[in-house]
Amino acid sequence: MTGSGGERNPGFADEVLRDLGAGVFTLDPAGRITYANPWAERLLGRPVARMLGHDAHDLLHRSPDGQPVPRERCLMRTPLAGSRDAVEGSEEYFLRGDGVLLPIIWSATPLGPGGTPDGVVIVFSDFSLHRDAEERAIAHTAALEALTNRLNLLAEVSSVLMSTMDAIAAARALLPLLVPELGLWAAVDLVDAHSGIPRRVAVRSPAHPDRARELTGPLPAVRQRPEIIRGDQPVLLEAGHLVGAGAPLAAGHGILFDRLGGRWATAVPIRSRRRFYGVLTVARGESRPPPEGETRLLADIGRRLALVLDNSQLYEEQRNVAETMQRQLLAPLPQVDHLRMAARYLPAQRAMEVGGDWYDAFLLADGVMALVIGDVVGHDLQAAVHMAEVRNMLRALAWSHVEPPSLIMRRLDEAVTHTSDAPMATLVFARVEGPEGGPWQLRWVNAGHPPPLLITSEGDSRFLTRGHGPLIGMSATLHLGLTWPDAREDLPARSTVLFYTDGLVESRERPIDAGMARLRHHAAVLARQPRAGTVDDFCDQLLQRLDPRGDDTALLALRLPPVGAGTPHDHSPPPPSQNAHSPAAPERAAPGSLQEQAPVQDPTRHTREALDPPRTPDV
């Protein structure tokens, strides 16, 4: 660098090298140090006066173990051999004045023009800073990969757990995600919701699959509840110290170590805010205990499993409430004179046990039999509640007002609109009128419901399509002023009238018109059989032929007696007694029944068992 007059500034080079931020020293052709900047003094812990004139290789250059590096392997001396190319390297070491090895990154450049170098300038920096940064970057990348793997695992766990409402199925589906990814074997113990007995519902061990299957079942009884049940923190188990009945989980987990191996295991509680469900255990074979991050991951998985079991428990509780409600709402059937009736109810296979479908049969104040089939919008517990409202309103109105069905419908529509939050409903309300022995007449109205089917004993069948009016809850709500026309039909002796909901004739595979044609065909075939059997047989065989699936289904069948049956001049034996079939509780009597505490049975039991065989209750 020159000044304003062109003269050279001798201090410029020193200023640059002093503030370069890297160590610099120069060597003469013999490899002796001729210059060192202040950064070199600082990095090497040596004053420049004690370095000048010394052979740089002998004084500074060392191998990683602190031993001198052979001269023939010293790349820094390459320019001294006549090479005009700069060389550089890393993972080399200089010996500081305090005896500590300094890892360096360096470059060596020949000095002087021409083919013979006048020396070498060596620039070096503390490589530990670069190495630490690199190690931090590697550690950061590894941590991100581990976090990504954990998040992916948790996503898979959540997906698997959300795919089922069955507690045991959820536990069994979970373990393949944990083993061998996180350990040698894994087990899930759940406390039975009814008996309170802990049961090992799933064990997985890729190395010993047969042994793992043998280890499922009830756990040994313990006098005191394990420590893990009282807390919500994971428990670390060591195989060598899992002795004695007083050790946490010793009674049930010792056999797992004995049969499946492993040194350490993490047992996490399956606990939600509502209750304790059990224990998830994952074992490792390493001599070291599992890292804290893995323990936190398993604790998170345990909480997720508890949430699934919470939802399953709530679903079961709601289903039990709904089923109990259903059994009380679907009434026993009264037996009136020689009339015979049968009813069936099949719950939806994919929804709640109870929807809005119902049937009803009861005696009115004037001694006439009333028949009802209906469907309130919805398929859940709320639909069952709304169904109960509509059903009870209709019963009260039909009993207290001896008037045509059309007027009862008008009153019901207004009552539902102004006193209930029930949604719209479809129904058929019918009166079976006639003296003992006949002739009989059906008088009815239809509020947007599938029409009843009349089947004669000869096999002739037709739908009773008259009497149609709007859905309940629509006319009064919209101020339409619509009405329900009364319809009448003479009922032949020994004929059958079938009332049903749309679940019997409608499905995703075919439209309702095709389903109604199919119903009419099978009902006629059954009526023409030489031995048609009772009306209960008719309902059972019809359901077997139609095999309704999807929506819930209710049907109510009325069988008329022969002409003159039950009159004083009739000496023929009476028809078989009507089975008081109903999903109601056995001690309930049918409304209007002449027999107190009439026996009541569940007609859907055999059908449901055929479609869905009984299984062990969920834990």
Image (cartoon, rainbow, N blue to C red):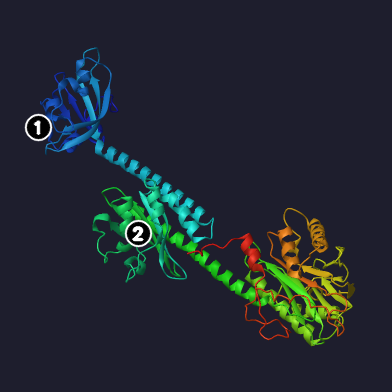
In the figure, is residue 491 to the left or right of 171?
Answer: right
In the figure, is residue 309 to the left or right of 87?
Answer: right
Q: Which element is circle 2 on?
A: strand
In the figure, is residue 496 to the left or right of 134?
Answer: right
Figure check: 361 above or below 269: below
Residue labelled with disc 2:
267
- Percent coordinates x, y for residue 301 in the rendering: 42, 57
Q: Quadrant of residue 561?
A: bottom right
- Quarter holding the N terminus is top left
- Find residue 417 and name its label: none
- Percent coordinates x, y for residue 230 in the rendering: 35, 69
Q: Which element is circle 1 on?
A: helix
Amino acid at dot 1: Arg
In-front residue for pair 565/100: 565
Residue depicted at x 32% and y 57%: 255
Figure check: 578 above or below 19: below
In-front residue for pair 359/317: 359
- Find residue 50 and name its label: 1
Amino acid at dot 2: Ala
